[in-house]
Amino acid sequence: MSASKSVAFHTLGCKLNFSETSSISRMMENEGFEKKDFDDVADVYVINTCSVTDNADKECRQLVRRIQRKSPESLVVITGCYAQLKPKEISEIPGVDLVLGAAEKFNIGKHIAELSKGDSAKISSCDIEDVTGFNSSFSINDRTRTFLKVQDGCDYTCSFCTIPMARGKSRSDSIANVIRNAEELAANGVKEIVLTGVNLGDFGKGPDGNKKHEENFFDLVQALDKVEGIQRYRISSIEPNLLTNEIITFVANSDKFMPHFHIPLQSGSNKTLGQMRRRYKRELYAERVQLIKTLMPHCAIGVDVIVGFPGETDEDFKETFDFLHSLDVSYLHVFTYSERDNTHALTINPVVPVNVRHERNKTLRNLSYMKMQYFTEQHAGQTRKVLFEGHEKNGMMEGYTDNYIKIAVPFNAEWVNNVVDWKV
């Protein structure tokens, strides 16, 4: 393929997807592609898909239609979790030329070189059990905060989740390689790294999917804490059963690891947690929150929660609401349960009506808003360190305090990618 070819990317879903898209983009630029904005006309469009949102299919089709209208001769490549789970379905979307599963997304240049517009869509995928190896990824130049992928895949079997089917067994980078990546990011002027993975706390299993932990997540955070040049780390999301007391204590005493945890709960009802096949009860979750707040009263805690799971009664939902209301957490990410093919949850009854699911979602989003307001008000008048980002919108810029309070101020070029003392 000639060096003058251009490529544009669109990412759906999580921080992990963003880190992978960024790495694939740099790889293709090194192969001679010119990177374009997704709204521009490009020779190749790559859509990195997600399987968590219930409208993955709809979003994918809409994006392909947009490309078809704008640039009908361009090649369209679909990869990511949805591409691994339903390659044939995606290949039948008019305009799609190539579908790449989990094992092939980092070989995209090789596949494009063999592709011609107008042929029937080519699928390059394999059984997820055969996906091994670890592709190191990080986002850079896209934002002040960089997402660094250190772990992939999951060995858990939560009854609502397709991620293990889309990403394979739990496997990790080595600590030595993560440190090299962090040092490279520091050399590029990055100030904050967000550690990402599918099941981050399970860090340490080898890239061949070996069940044995060669290293662990606590080893990793201790090693990263010593890297020169990186001022801030955040732990993107960690299961409550894997968030150990020693990790919490270490973060409390670290200058670099920010007082901010995101801990999935999914339900405040032990009955529902059991049906979800989660590996803890609400009592353990409450213990984790209590220890964090004892050691770091100023710490932000985010919570993932699913509403409308099959069998969730009004009483179960009230239990979840009351539990969350009582917890000293800062904000909620609320997901409305949606059915996923080949998951155990499809066998659980009764099914919660969709309108009830949406009503419960709204109730918890209102609670989240109140939680965040209260958390922010607790820190009013305090001076905290804010890392400001470079995006200017309507003459304003944004940044986050160490404990994840969003600050908006008039744009000041001198503050971009700098940590500034700011009165909340």
Image (tube, rainbow, N blue to C red):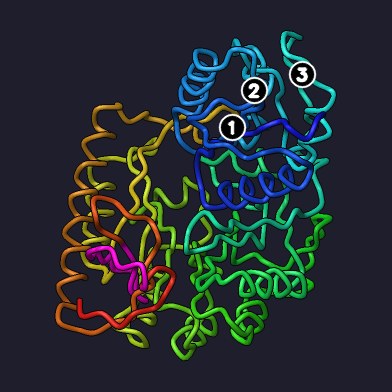
Q: Nearer the viewer, residue 209 or 285?
A: 209
Which residue is located at x 31 percent, y 56 percent?
332
Q: Which residue is mark 3?
A: 122
* Sequence-earlier tag: 2 or 1: 1
- Location of residue 174 in the rendering, given as x and y in whole percent from the top left corner: 77, 69
- Location of residue 22 in the rendering, given as x and y in whole percent from the top left corner: 62, 49
Near mark 3 (Cα within 10 A), the count class, few <14, some 14-19 or many ≥20, is some
- Evaluate if marks 3 and 2 touch, with contact meaning CB atoms under 8 Å apart: no
Which residue is located at x 52 percent, y 52 percent?
15
Q: Give the secondary structure at mark 1.
A: strand
- Location of residue 416 in the rendering, given as x and y in whole percent from the top left corner: 40, 68
Disc 3 vs disc 2: which is toward the camera? 2
Type of amino acid under label 2: Val
Q: Is residue 20 above or below residue 82?
A: below
* Sequence-earlier tag: 1 or 3: 1
- Evaluate if marks 2 and 1 touch, with contact meaning CB atoms under 8 Å apart: yes
> Marks 2 and 1, Cα distance to the nearest angstrom?
8 Å
Q: Is residue 406 magenta?
A: yes
From this viewpoint, is residue 300 visible? no
> Marks 1 and 3, Cα distance to the nearest angstrom?
15 Å
Badge number at residue 47: 1
Residue 227 quadrant: bottom right
Q: Nearer the viewer, residue 146 or 3?
A: 3
Q: Is residue 308 left or right of residue 222?
A: left
Q: Is residue 53 left or right of residue 289?
A: right
* Sequence-earlier tag: 3 or 2: 2
Q: Which range is magenta? A: 398-414
- Location of residue 60 in the rendering, given as x and y in whole percent from the top left corner: 52, 25
Type of amino acid under label 1: Ile
